[in-house]
Amino acid sequence: MNHSIIASDSQHVWHPFTHLKYAEAPVQLVRGEGAYFYDAEGHKLLDAISSWWVNLHGHCHPYISQKVSEQLFSLEHAIFSAFTHEPAVKLAERLIGHLPGNQSKIFYSDNGSTAVEVGLKMVLQYWHNTGRPKKKFIALENAYHGDTFGGMSVGARNVFNNAFENLLFEVVHIPVPDAANIEQLETTLKSWFTNHSDFAGFIFEPLVQGASGMVMYEAQYLDRLMAVCREHGIVCIADEVMTGFGRTGKFFASDYLEQKPDIICLSKGLTGGYMPLGVTSCAQFIYDACVSDDKTKTFFHGHSYTANPTACAAGLASLDLMEQEGTRKQIAMIEALHREFREKQQGHPRLADIRSFGTILALEIGTEEHTHYLNKASESIAAYFLRHHIIVRPLGNVLYLVTPYCITEAELRNVYGVMEGFLETLG
């Protein structure tokens, strides 16, 4: 360990999502390769969470690294208002080819939070430009949509945004749909939309709510809610920041839906974990509402690094790998092994629940505390796995895996073994 780096970190750096008073010294990482990080003490650490869900193909993938390097020697950055460049155009074209057929335009930003913020503003601007200034959103309970003010507003009111609650705009939160509540939810939405004219949009994380503890639900119930929204002209936004690019088994979680979102937000895996980049795609009618002789109807939104060429080059390279048969086989392998492990552990006395969807596996550890982000079990779980040279970041008492697609069967089975060992320690 380089003690001067750790000391300087303590003096100068503010880490995200960190309980600052009691936080232990961070692990210093010095390089990455494939599914692994290497720390300053020479330990080889399996990255079981894809470095906050962003890394698709493995760290320092030679193909993506080469494409990013080539881009750096031709055009590293460019203003994207009144100018364009090939990486942005090609990436938009290829994304549209994978997205649901109703998507027609790509708007670039910097990250998942900004992708959501753009989506919310698109909805509000659409209603404003069409002369019907609707402002109220519907979102799911326990939602997480980022840390900008729009994202916090449509997210659950919880520890992430308590300090800002009085500044957030009004949002109606409804339960995650399931067999028990779907009919009541349909009736409620129809009543709201019939008796109130101020509902603008419905935003959701399709089929998996990430930060709330990998909460999973079925496409058929989301389809029914979206159908009610569509009947009443409510704009639907799918936040696929976490679920996109194969995480649910299909290219996008929206691919499981019969009803297609009007707006889709992407980031995380978009560049394979290489560069910050966000995308908000939209149906043509959203774009058309901003095409006018009236300059005040312009969508006045942008970022200094909008469509950064280097990030777009990383996105194109990552898509090249996503489209390979080998990647699809790896995703299928991970999905099958997760199902096998889930079935094996189903009913374990120390598990409140175990669930999987695509390449995502979640174990809800039974604790005296209710399941929530601040459940104190997270520290002991993370520490146990780090002692076994595996990086996890539990969501409270929810231990989950979101691995890079390059992980091998042997490596994944080793992680399962450590999971089983951890459960044994609980008695």
Image (cartoon, grey):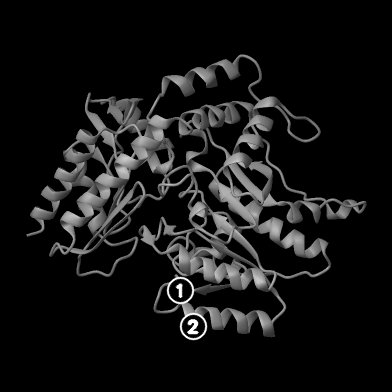
Residue at 82% across, 61% down: 129
Q: Specify the amino acid type for callout 1.
A: Pro
Q: Specify the amino acid type for callout 2.
A: Gln
Residue 176, image x and y in percent?
Answer: 44, 70
Do labels 1 and 2 touch, CB within 8 Å? Answer: no
Residue at 57% across, 67% down: 226
Q: Check the image and report above or below for 317 versus 121.
A: above
Residue topped by disc 2 = 184
Image position of 404 (left or right of 412): right
Q: Check the image and report above or below for 59 versus 17.
A: above
Residue at 34% across, 31% down: 406
Label 1 vs 2, first from the N-terminus: 1
Q: Quadrant of residue 138?
A: bottom right
| Residue depth check, mark 1 versus mark 2: number of the one nearer the observer | 2
Residue 62, image x and y in percent?
Answer: 42, 19
Q: Check the image and report above or below for 372 versus 67.
A: below
Compute the Cα span from label 1 to label 2: 11 Å
Disc 2 on helix, strand or loop? helix
Circle 2 residues within 10 Å: few <14, some 14–19, many ≥20: few
Closer-to-camera residue (297/160): 297
Residue topped by disc 1 = 175
Would residue 149 be visible to someone looking at this image? yes
